[in-house]
Image (spheres, rainbow, N blue to C red):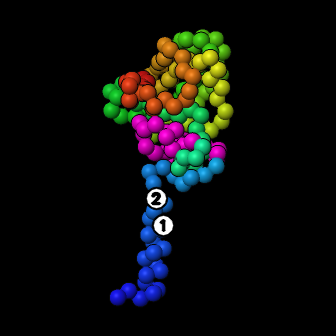
Amino acid sequence: MLKKRNFVLLLALAFIGLGVSSCEKEGGNEKKISHHSDNESHNMGQDCMGCHKSGGEGSGWFNAAGTVYDSTLVSTLSNTTIRLYTQPNGGGQLKYTLEGDSKGNFYTTEDVNFGDGLYPSVQGPNGKKFMSTSVKKGACNSCHGVTNDKLWGY
């Protein structure tokens, strides 16, 4: 028979265990912006905005996020730079620049106005790659790695 003190301790541990999830705790729109060499991100290749959204379990509501892989599509590519332009192939106006972290992830809670669409590029250590079509949302891993090839760079 469990003593009352042991039962209370077990009950408290059970409640703590219920709060654990693959994304961090639920919270408000905490400022989260990836930077080169950071290593605090997680869940490479998954749709970041599945958790990092209003009402989601992840802290911070991402407006653009994803994972960049190397050309083998097996390993992530660290410290990339993602740029969003108003025209294809780096043309028009550069609107936003995001840095990928050491795990290949990039993300931001800052406002990103996709308007009629923006054209992404990925800059790795060996060159730049452009996406030929525009995007109107920043949930990159909701398509890349699901219905399209993984997002990759050089």
The local crowd at label 1, few if under 14, some if 14 to 19, many if 20 or more residues have their Cα within 10 Å, is few
> With respect to residue 89, does 59 lie above or below?
below
Q: Is residue 69 visible?
A: yes
Residue 116 shown left or right of residue 18 in the figure? right
Per the rendering, the mark at residue 47 is: none
Where does label 2 land, which residue?
Answer: 20
Return the residue nearer the eye: 81 or 134: 134
Q: Residue 42, how many percent across, how many down?
A: 46, 45
Count of numbered circles on the image? 2
Label 2 to label 1, Cα distance in Å?
7 Å
Figure quadrant of the C terminus: top left
Q: Which image quadrant for residue 36?
A: top right
Where does label 1 land, which residue?
Answer: 16
> With respect to residue 49, does 96 lie above or below?
above
Q: Is residue 36 visible?
A: no
Q: Which image quadrant for residue 18?
A: bottom left
Return the residue nearer the eye: 74 or 65: 65
Q: What residue type is labelled 2?
A: Val
Element type at marker 1? Answer: helix
Residue at x 60% of width, y 43% of height: 54
Q: What residue type is labelled 1?
A: Ile
Figure quadrant of the N terminus: bottom left
Q: Is the magenta stretch mostly helix, strand or loop?
A: loop
> With respect to residue 106, does 23 lie above or below?
below
Residue at x 62% of width, y 17% of height: 116
The magenta stretch is 29-53
Q: Residue 133, how many percent across, how many down?
A: 50, 14
Q: Residue 21, how many percent across, how many down?
A: 45, 54
The local crowd at label 2, few if under 14, some if 14 to 19, many if 20 or more residues have their Cα within 10 Å, is few
Q: Residue 90, how many percent across, how many down?
A: 57, 14
Residue at x 54% of width, y 17% of height: 134
